[in-house]
Image (tube, helix red, strand yellow):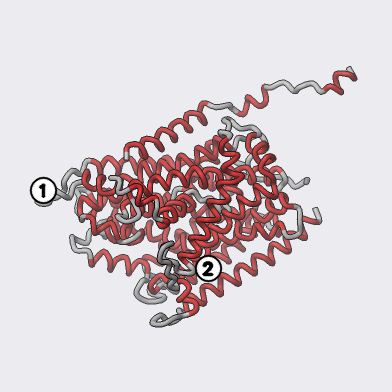
Amino acid sequence: MTQKKTEAWSSKIGVIMAVAGSAVGLGNFLRFPGLVADKETGGGAFLIAYFISLLVVGLPICWVEWTLGRFGGTQGYNSSPGIFHAIIRKPWGKYLGLLGFIIPVGVYFYYVVIESWCLGYAWSSFTGGLDLGKDSAPYAAHFAQTTGLKADGAILGLSAPFLFFIGVFILNFVIIYRGLSKGIEFICNWGMPLLIVIALVLLVRVLTLGTPDPAKPELSVWNGLGYMWNPHDIAQGLSNPAVWLKAASQIFFTLSVGFGVIITYASYLKKNDDVVLSGLTATAANEFCEVGLGGLITVPAAFAFLGASAVAGGTFALGFNVLPQVFAGMPYGHLFGGLFFTLLFIAAITSSLSMLQPGIAFLEEGLGLDRRGSVALLGLVTAVGCTLVVWFSEGLKALSTVDFWIGDIGIFLQGTLLIYVFNFAFGTERGWTEAHHGADIRIPRIFKFVIRWVSPAFLTAIFAMFVLKNVAGWNLSFTAPLFTPTEPILDLVGGPNHPASGVARLTAFFLLLFGLFSALLIHRAGKRWDAR
Amino acid sequence: MLISVGGVTALFVWCLHKVLTGKKPSDHLAHVEPVEQADLEKR
């Protein structure tokens, strides 16, 4: 392989920051606290399942991705299709990397839209535009206005949400055009420490809230912490499949494993660069942000001001309806609210940048495009996908359809594929040796057994359960199983009292076309790689 | 809560410490190439 390597990380801490930046996202500060606070599937049982999933799935797949990525890089490949081509050495091998291209680009279609909401909310908070009083209705209206929730095409034109979207979309491509080191690494090196500092400021603010309304002494921040963290019935919780499914899914999504990002980022490492400590550090950084910061800020604050009912509305409701109301109720709320949404924006942009790099890497090495050409082509593809999401905004139908088929199903599939390729195509023994090449620390030997047997079995079981629940509509009961078609399926095929959604069908058709287009590109790239 | 938050914080701090005080790129340059048996016989 004589291909010249043009991109590399400038420092070890830089790649760790970049991977951590990719992993730390909105889920750390909004989704995780909501899951822990859930009265039926949260609490101590959730946390035990969460940390077991971290050890059995998260960390092992993380090391697998880092190892395979660095190996691919030494063979001259930076994209998932290229790396799988280098590992499997069969004509079909490169197609196994298809999801490693589709997933990050597909998730970008809607992630950058949510990112623009965060920036818009930060602006509104700092300028006092989010101080909408004590009633919850104006906050819901503001969210609907920002997202175009009420009607398709509602935010198109010269509206502020649309301008924020255009600005954020362009900003991502300007940064990515600057390259790996000057673009992504630079932003993450500044962004991640800034994110942690802002989170610590907010944490101090939340923990010193005390009892905001003396007339309601039960609504205090300490009771909020207790509401979220006090263990429920652990034995009963751990026997509930829903607890395991939620915990394993959260680990999977929060670490960005199976996303196609880590494998690409690691491919820019040198042969003797460490992957073991780097992978562990990026994972630890994500867990610190999620459990140590995210877990202590949002839910306790919401509880202290609005009570338990306020934290049960889901990720978007907690972030964009409840928390602005909370900030409006505290002194200097516009400042703390602005800081909170700035934090979300930083978390989002370091993640969205990571979603573009796998696409750039593939277009450059697969089609021989230069940086300008790859940025232009990827910009065009993502602009079409984002237009779909922004245009068909009613009920966020297009967004949720892409999220389900790409962001949920796709990531599980890719993660499962990765662990099987590592064990059965690359070889566990070879992979173990490869991982320790240049390693600063050794992985405990027990993880060799975990990676070989436990992770694939656990992941397969969780994936099967996920599909049975979310596609087949299983009620997660072994004793009285019941299958009811779920909304994403009903949206496509229709059912009694639930007509099929034209937007969902159009979105699914677009995703199918995007998948076929990507497969064609991989086919063409394969010819180029075979000719090397 | 203390175990979860304390645990991840301790792990993060330990990892950062290992990364920041670990081997530098210059360590790779400073090592001595091992002499191959074939080279030894040639000499």
> Which mark is first along the chain, 2 or 1?
1
| Residue position for label 2 | A385
At a point 53% along the width and 68% down the height, the residue shown is A385
Same chain, labels 1 and 2:
yes
At a point 37% along the width and 76% down the height, the residue shown is A151
The residue lying furthest to the left in this view is A215
The type of residue carrying mark 1 is Pro
The residue lying furthest to the right in this view is B42
- Viewer can see residue A5: yes
Q: Residue A314: where, in percent of width, then height? A: 34, 60
Q: How many marks?
A: 2
Lateral position of residue A517 relative to residue B4, left or right = right
Label 1 element class: loop
Residue A408 or residue A335, whichever sits in front = A408
| Residue position for label 1 | A214
Mark 1 is surrounded, within 10 Å at the Cα level, by few (under 14), some (14 to 19) or many (20 or more) other residues, namely few
**Which chain does tag 2 point to?**
A
